[in-house]
Image (tube, rainbow, N blue to C red):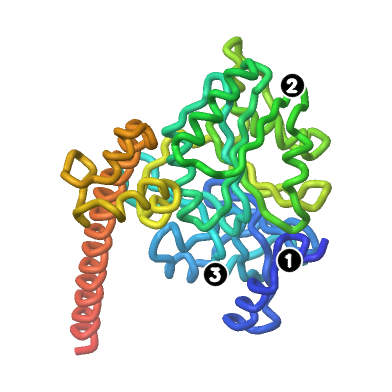
């Protein structure tokens, strides 16, 4: 398999040559599991680890490799394993606020062309959660496609109602409906998959991601488990991994994400909530909070039933959350820099005492 078949475009090749020279080997990260890596090049897949220098120089987790990254490597012991020296610049990325109280980014995957955002029509459908997925996808400069699965569990009228709710929320992304049971819609997804392009699957546990991958791969590429009595699938994916499909497309599978915390998503908010962003530009006051101020174009749209009040509430909720996390992140980074300067000054002073 050639590197171009793994998604190496001229842009990545030029970056590698300009930054590291023409002879530095590059490979793509295909799996990450608790700090361990698998990389793949034209010769096959190899286990890899980070060099100590690279790990020490990393300022945050964003600087470390994730699935989909292109990395500069050295092979050891007849290619039995490798070391990763650096990460090439990314064209796109998926990241979120790390789960829990820690205000830090968590990298999910990188260099993705299209994100399939999956929701089941039955138990899993949640419009507010869908909007959160679209924020992080848009922020990462990735094209979203919505996959509504398990259509066999709802009536045509119920499915049409769900699609109507999505459109009423101002979401204009392509929608594909499908059923892993009947096979309806699977061919539509296959038609979207192009050789050398990278896709990912985003969705909660049990919405049918693993089953869909096996359908697209025309074989058991991943382990699946049974479905509960509610129609909810049982979670099987335990790590992020990149799979090469038979038709040449590259697909990243990942565990379901329970938390979708917002951090550094200003551009993504403007794109995912473009209807509100456009209305806000015509409000009487530039600092309008859309909470009853005179001349608020957003509230006027809600009064005309052109905009959903629930849609606005989610926008305001995510905006407030993101602003709080952004300020906390900046403050933490400021303290980290101050602590670093303190340590440097102590070490410099200690070195001067040792010399004397």
User: Which class describes the residues within 10 Å of circle 1: few (<14), some (14-19), or many (20+)?
Assistant: few
- Please tell me the numbered disc located at residue 181: 2
- Please tell me the numbered disc located at residue 77: 1
Of residues 183 and 103, the one drawn nearer to the viewer in this rendering: 183
Residue located at (54% from left, 69% from top): 89
Q: Residue furthest top?
A: 229
Q: State the separation of the CA atoms marked 3 and 1.
A: 28 Å
Q: Is residue 302 left or right of residue 142?
A: left
Image-quadrant location for residue 329: bottom left
Q: State the separation of the CA atoms marked 2 and 3.
A: 40 Å
Q: State the separation of the CA atoms marked 1 and 2.
A: 47 Å
Residue depth check, mark 1 versus mark 2: number of the one nearer the observer: 2
Q: Residue furthest bottom?
A: 356
Residue located at (79% from left, 40% from top): 217
Q: SS at mark 1? A: loop
Q: SS at mark 2? A: loop
Q: Are marks 1 and 2 in contact (CB under 8 Å)?
A: no
Who comes first in sequence, dot 1 or dot 2?
1
Q: SS at mark 3? A: loop
| Disc 3 target residue | 89
Vertical order, 156 against 74 (above or below): above
Who comes first in sequence, dot 2 or dot 3?
3
User: Which class describes the residues within 10 Å of circle 2: few (<14), some (14-19), or many (20+)?
Assistant: few
Relative image position of residue 236 (x, y in whole percent): 62, 30
Relative image position of residue 14 (x, y in whole percent): 65, 78
User: Which class describes the residues within 10 Å of circle 3: few (<14), some (14-19), or many (20+)?
Assistant: some
Q: Are marks 2 and 3 in contact (CB under 8 Å)?
A: no
């Amino acid at each position: 398999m050639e590197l171009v078949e793994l998604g190496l475009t001229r842009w990545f090749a030029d970056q590698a040559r300009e930054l590291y020279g023409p002879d530095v080997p590059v490979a793509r990260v295909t799996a990450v599991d608790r700090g361990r890596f698998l990389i793949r090049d034209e010769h096959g897949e190899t286990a890899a680890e980070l060099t100590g220098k690279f790990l020490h120089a990393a300022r945050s987790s964003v600087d470390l490799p994730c699935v989909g990254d292109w990395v500069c490597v050295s092979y050891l012991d007849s290619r039995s394993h490798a070391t990763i020296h650096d990460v090439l610049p990314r064209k796109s990325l998926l990241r979120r606020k790390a789960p829990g109280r820690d205000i830090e980014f968590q990298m999910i995957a990188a260099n993705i062309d299209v994100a399939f955002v999956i929701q089941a029509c039955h138990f899993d459908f949640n419009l507010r959660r869908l909007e959160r997925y679209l924020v992080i996808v848009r922020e990462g400069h990735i094209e979203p496609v919505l996959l509504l699965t398990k259509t066999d569990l709802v009536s045509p009228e119920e499915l049409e109602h769900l699609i109507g709710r999505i459109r009423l929320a101002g979401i204009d992304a392509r929608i594909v409906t499908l059923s892993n049971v009947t096979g309806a819609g699977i061919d539509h997804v296959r038609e979207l998959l192009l050789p050398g392009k990278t896709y990912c699957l985003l969705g909660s546990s049990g919405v049918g991601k693993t089953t869909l991958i096996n359908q697209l791969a025309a074989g058991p590429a991943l382990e699946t488990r049974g479905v509960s009595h509610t129609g909810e699938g049982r979670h099987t994916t335990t790590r992020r991994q990149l799979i090469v499909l038979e038709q040449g497309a590259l697909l990243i599978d990942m565990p379901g994400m329970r938390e979708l915390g917002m951090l550094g998503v200003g551009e993504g908010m403007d794109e995912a909530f473009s209807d509100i962003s456009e209305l806000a530009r015509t409000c009487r006051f530039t600092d309008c909070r859309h909470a009853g101020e005179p001349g608020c174009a957003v509230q006027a749209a809600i009064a005309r039933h052109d905009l959903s009040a629930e849609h606005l509430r989610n926008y305001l909720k995510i905006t407030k959350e993101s602003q709080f996390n952004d300020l906390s992140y900046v403050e933490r980074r400021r303290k980290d820099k101050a602590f670093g300067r303190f340590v440097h000054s102590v070490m410099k002073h200690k070195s001067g005492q040792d010399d004397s």
